[in-house]
C-alpha cells in the first residue's frame, strides 16, 4: 500500500560495535587527520563530488562511525587532483591522507 | 729504444692486472644483465640500433662529446668542465698514446695488458728520434693536463664554492676510498716516471723532476717502490669502482646508446632504470638545482641520494625520497648524464601495493558528452584546477569571443580529471580509465582543436591521449597565434612590466618557452627572472609531491618569488592555475594568468 511517504532505514550508529582499527592506524600515520574541523571545504571543491558524493570530511567521519562500505565507495572515486589539499584551512595533506587510506586494509594493516 | 728486461715482467704489475680483470669482468656481466633485463621489444630495438649506421655515428659522437670532453658540463660551468674533461680526456689520451708507443716500437708486446700502462718502466726510449721526442712530449703534456684536473678536484672537495657549487654531495665511505685512490694515481705516475726518466727518457715534466730528485734522493732505489705504489693505486681504484660513484664511467657508455635508441624506464629497478641509477656520478649538481634544497634539511631528498639509496636497496628511504619530490624535472634539465629523476620516482611509486583500487569505469559520461555533442571548432577544457581560479576561465572565454573563435566549454557543469595527478601518484592503469572517459567526450564533440589553460592537463592530453586529427594546444600558444594573425590586438602599455614564470609542465615538460613571452611582449614590457626557461624554479605547489606539507612548501614558493622579482616587474604572469594560486598566496605584487593580462589589454 502506498501512503505517499517512505520510511528511511535507521542510520543509528552503535559506537560500541564499531571497529576503529583503520581510523586509529590512519591517525597514527597521518596525525594531521586529528586537526580536521569538518568545515567541508574539501567537499565543496572536489572534482569527483558532483557525480560520486566523494568528500574527505565524510570519509574521516565515516571512519569514526565505522561506515566502512561508504568510505570505500567514496575513496574509489577520488581522482587525486589535490584541490582539497589546496583549500584545507588546517593545511592537512588530504591527498596523501587518501593515498594512505587506500593502502590500509579493513583491519588497519598496511598492505605490502 | 731498447727493452730493459728480457722477460718483460715485474711482479709490481700484478695488482694492476687483478684490478683490470676484475673491473672488466664486472662491467661485462653487468652490461649483459642490464640488456637481458630489458623487455623483449626494447632489447630488439636497442640491439638493432647498434648495427644501424646512423645510430653508430650518433653513439660514437655522443660518447666522445659527453664522456670524454663533457661538452654539457663546459656549457654549464667552465671550471668544472675543464676539471672533468682534463681528467677524462687526458687519461684516455695517456692510454691511447701508451698503446701507440707499444704498437710503434714493440708490436710483439701488444698482447701484454700492462705494457702500455707501464711502458716507461719496461722500455728505455730515446727522445733523440722524432717520434720518440714527440710521444714523450705528448705523454708529459697529457699527464700535466690530468694533474691540473686533479688539483681542481681537490680544491672542489674542500671549497666547492670556488668552482661555483654551493653544495656538493656527501660522499659514502667507499666513494672516499675511490676518490683518494683516483687522486693518488696520477701524482704517483708522475713520481714513478720521474724516478726512471734518466734511464727510460722523458720530456719537459719528468726530466726536470728527475734532476731535482737526483739532488737529494737516490733515484734507482726509489723507482721500484713508486711503480708498485702506482700499480696498487690503480688496483684499489678499479676494485672499488663498481661499488662507488665511479661506476658512472662504464655505465654512461651503455646509457648513451640506449637513450639514443629511445629506450625508456619500464621497470622501477631493472634494465634502463638500473642503468640510470648506476650512471649517476653523484656530482651533486641536482642538489643546488632542486627547489626543495632551499631548506638544507631537504637536500637529502634530491635525485643524487635517490640513486644512492636505490643502489643500496634501502626501501624506507627510497619511498621517502620518491614521495617527497615535486617532479618539477629541474634535476633532469641540469643533469650532465641525463638521469631522469622524476621518471625514476614515478616508477618507484608504481611499485606500491594498495588495498583499495579506485575504479572510474562506471562513471556515466553521457550527460557530459551530450552537452558538447557535435559542437566542432574549438573545445575548451578548463580543467579542474580552474575551478579554484575561475578568472582564468572567464578571461579565456572572453578572449575567444573577442577573436571571433567558435568555442564550446567541455566542463561547463562538471568534468573529470585529466589523469595526470593519478599518473604522478603512480597509478597509471587508473589514469587510463579516466583517459578513456575523457576521450569519449572529446570524440563526441567532433572538435578540431582542444584548448587547455592548464599545463598539467596539456601535457597529459599531448602525451597520453590518442587524439589523431585534433590539435592539442595550450592557451598561451593559441593566443600568441591569434595575436600574430591579427585577430587579437592587445594595446601595449609601456608602463607595465611583466615577468613570465615558466610552469614546470609547460616549459620543461612540453618545451614551450617562447610563445607566451611573445604574447606578453605585445601587451607590455617583458623582463626575465633570475633563473628562467629550462631552469625556472617550481612554484612549490606541484601535485608531484605526495608528502610535502603546506608549511614546507612555503619556503619554496618564497624562493621562487624572489627569483621572479629580481627585475622588479609590476606583475607576475604565468600560464598555470596551480602556480597562480600558489604564488597568489604569498606574492607582494599581482599574480595573473596570461589570459587575464591579454584580456585586459584587448
Image (cartoon, coloured by chain):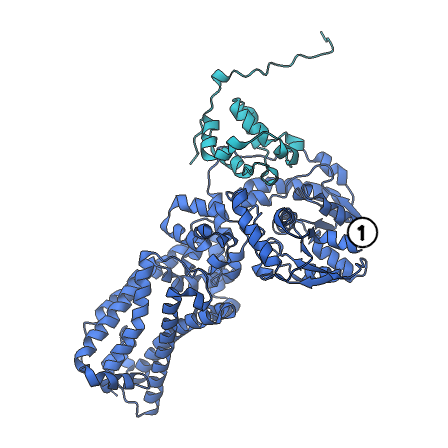
| Relative to B124, B471 lies left or right | right
Question: Percent x, y for residue B471?
Answer: 70, 53
Residue B379 seen from this side: yes
Residue in the image at 47% along x and 68% along y:
B66
For residue B495, which quarter of the picture? Answer: bottom right
Considering every residue shown, the one lying at the far front of the view is B588
Q: x and y percent of residue A102 in the render?
A: 51, 34
Q: In this view of the protein, which residue sits in the foreground, B330 or B569? A: B569
Task: Identify which residue is drawn at 58% across, 56% down.
Answer: B562
Q: How many marks?
A: 1
Q: Position of residue B410 (x, y in %)?
A: 73, 42
Closer to the camera, B561 or B61?
A: B561
- The C terminus of chain B lies in quadrant: bottom right
Q: Residues within 10 Å of mark 1 (few under 14, many from 20)?
A: some
Q: As displayed, is residue B429 above or below residue B77?
A: above
Give the residue at x 32% y 78%. B98
Is the N terminus of chain B in the top left, top right, bottom left or bottom right quadrant?
bottom left
B261 or B596: nearer the eye? B596
Chain B image colour? blue
Answer with the quarter of the image where residue B158 lies: bottom left
Q: Whole-percent x and y of residue B417?
A: 63, 41
Helix, strand or loop at mark 1: loop
- Chain A in the picture: what colour? cyan
Reading the image, the residue beneath label 1 is B405
Amino acid at each position: 500500500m502506498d501512503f505517499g511517504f517512505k520510511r528511511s532505514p535507521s542510520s543509528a550508529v552503535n559506537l560500541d560495535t564499531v571497529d576503529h582499527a583503520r581510523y586509529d592506524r590512519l591517525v597514527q600515520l597521518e596525525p594531521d587527520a586529528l586537526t580536521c574541523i569538518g568545515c567541508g571545504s574539501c567537499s565543496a571543491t572536489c572534482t569527483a563530488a558532483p557525480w560520486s558524493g566523494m568528500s574527505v570530511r565524510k570519509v574521516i567521519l565515516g571512519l569514526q562511525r565505522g561506515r566502512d562500505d561508504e568510505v570505500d565507495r567514496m575513496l574509489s572515486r577520488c581522482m587525486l587532483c589535490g584541490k582539497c589539499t589546496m583549500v584545507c584551512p588546517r593545511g592537512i595533506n588530504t591527498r596523501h591522507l587518501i593515498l594512505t587510506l587506500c593502502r590500509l586494509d579493513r583491519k588497519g594493516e598496511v598492505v605490502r | 729504444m731498447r727493452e730493459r728486461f728480457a722477460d718483460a715482467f715485474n711482479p709490481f704489475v700484478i695488482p694492476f692486472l687483478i684490478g683490470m680483470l676484475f673491473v672488466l669482468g664486472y662491467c661485462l656481466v653487468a652490461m649483459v644483465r642490464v640488456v637481458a633485463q630489458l623487455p623483449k621489444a626494447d632489447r630488439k630495438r636497442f640491439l638493432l640500433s647498434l648495427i644501424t649506421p646512423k645510430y653508430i655515428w650518433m653513439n660514437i659522437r655522443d660518447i666522445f662529446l659527453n664522456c670524454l670532453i663533457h661538452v654539457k658540463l663546459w656549457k654549464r660551468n667552465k671550471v668544472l668542465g675543464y676539471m672533468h674533461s682534463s681528467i677524462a680526456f687526458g687519461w684516455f689520451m695517456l692510454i691511447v698514446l701508451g698503446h701507440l708507443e707499444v704498437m710503434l716500437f714493440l708490436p710483439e708486446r701488444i698482447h701484454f695488458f700492462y705494457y702500455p700502462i707501464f711502458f716507461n718502466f719496461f722500455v728505455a726510449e730515446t727522445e733523440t728520434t722524432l717520434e720518440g721526442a714527440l710521444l714523450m712530449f705528448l705523454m708529459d703534456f697529457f699527464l700535466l693536463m690530468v694533474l691540473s684536473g686533479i688539483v681542481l678536484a681537490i680544491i672542489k672537495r674542500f671549497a666547492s664554492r670556488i668552482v661555483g657549487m654551493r653544495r656538493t654531495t656527501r660522499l659514502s665511505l667507499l666513494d672516499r676510498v675511490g676518490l683518494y685512490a683516483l687522486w693518488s694515481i696520477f701524482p704517483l705516475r708522475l713520481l714513478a716516471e720521474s724516478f726512471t726518466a734518466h734511464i727510460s727518457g722523458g720530456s719537459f715534466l719528468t726530466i726536470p723532476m728527475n734532476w731535482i730528485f737526483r739532488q737529494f734522493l737516490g733515484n734507482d732505489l726509489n723507482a721500484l717502490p713508486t711503480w708498485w705504489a702506482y700499480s696498487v693505486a690503480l688496483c684499489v681504484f678499479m676494485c672499488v669502482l663498481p661499488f662507488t660513484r665511479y661506476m658512472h664511467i662504464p655505465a654512461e657508455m651503455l646509457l648513451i646508446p640506449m637513450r639514443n635508441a629511445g629506450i625508456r624506464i619500464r621497470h622501477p629497478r631493472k634494465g634502463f632504470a638500473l642503468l640510470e641509477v648506476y650512471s649517476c656520478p653523484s656530482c651533486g649538481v641536482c642538489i643546488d638545482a632542486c627547489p626543495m634544497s632551499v631548506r638544507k634539511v631537504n637536500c637529502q631528498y634530491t635525485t643524487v641520494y635517490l640513486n644512492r639509496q636505490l643502489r643500496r636497496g634501502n626501501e624506507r628511504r627510497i619511498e621517502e625520497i620518491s614521495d617527497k619530490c615535486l617532479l618539477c624535472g629541474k634535476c633532469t634539465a641540469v643533469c650532465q648524464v641525463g638521469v631522469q629523476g622524476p621518471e625514476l620516482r614515478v616508477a618507484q611509486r608504481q611499485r606500491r601495493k594498495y588495498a583499495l583500487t579506485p575504479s572510474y569505469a562506471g562513471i556515466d559520461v553521457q550527460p557530459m558528452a551530450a552537452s558538447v555533442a557535435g559542437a566542432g571548432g574549438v573545445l575548451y577544457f578548463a580543467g579542474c584546477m580552474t575551478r579554484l581560479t575561475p578568472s582564468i576561465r572567464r578571461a579565456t572565454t572572453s578572449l575567444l569571443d573577442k577573436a571571433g573563435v567558435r568555442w564550446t566549454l567541455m566542463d561547463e557543469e562538471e568534468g573529470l580529471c585529466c589523469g595526470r595527478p593519478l599518473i604522478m601518484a603512480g597509478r597509471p592503469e587508473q589514469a587510463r580509465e579516466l583517459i578513456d572517459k575523457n576521450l569519449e567526450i572529446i570524440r563526441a564533440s567532433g572538435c578540431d582543436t582542444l584548448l587547455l589553460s592548464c599545463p598539467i592537463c596539456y601535457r597529459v592530453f599531448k602525451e597520453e591521449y590518442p587524439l589523431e586529427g585534433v590539435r592539442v594546444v595550450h592557451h598561451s600558444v593559441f593566443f600568441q597565434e591569434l595575436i600574430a594573425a591579427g585577430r587579437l590586438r592587445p594595446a601595449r602599455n609601456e608602463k607595465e612590466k611583466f615577468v613570465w614564470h615558466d610552469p614546470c609542465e609547460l616549459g620543461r615538460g612540453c618545451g614551450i618557452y617562447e610563445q607566451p613571452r611573445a604574447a606578453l611582449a605585445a601587451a607590455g614590457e617583458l623582463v626575465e627572472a633570475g633563473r628562467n626557461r629550462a631552469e625556472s624554479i617550481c612554484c612549490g605547489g606541484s601535485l608531484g609531491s605526495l608528502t610535502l606539507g603546506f608549511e614546507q612548501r612555503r619556503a619554496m614558493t618564497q624562493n621562487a618569488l624572489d627569483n621572479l622579482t629580481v627585475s622588479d616587474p609590476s606583475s607576475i604572469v604565468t600560464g598555470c592555475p596551480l602556480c597562480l594560486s600558489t604564488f597568489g598566496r604569498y606574492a607582494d605584487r599581482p599574480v595573473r594568468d596570461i589570459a587575464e593580462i591579454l584580456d585586459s589589454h584587448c
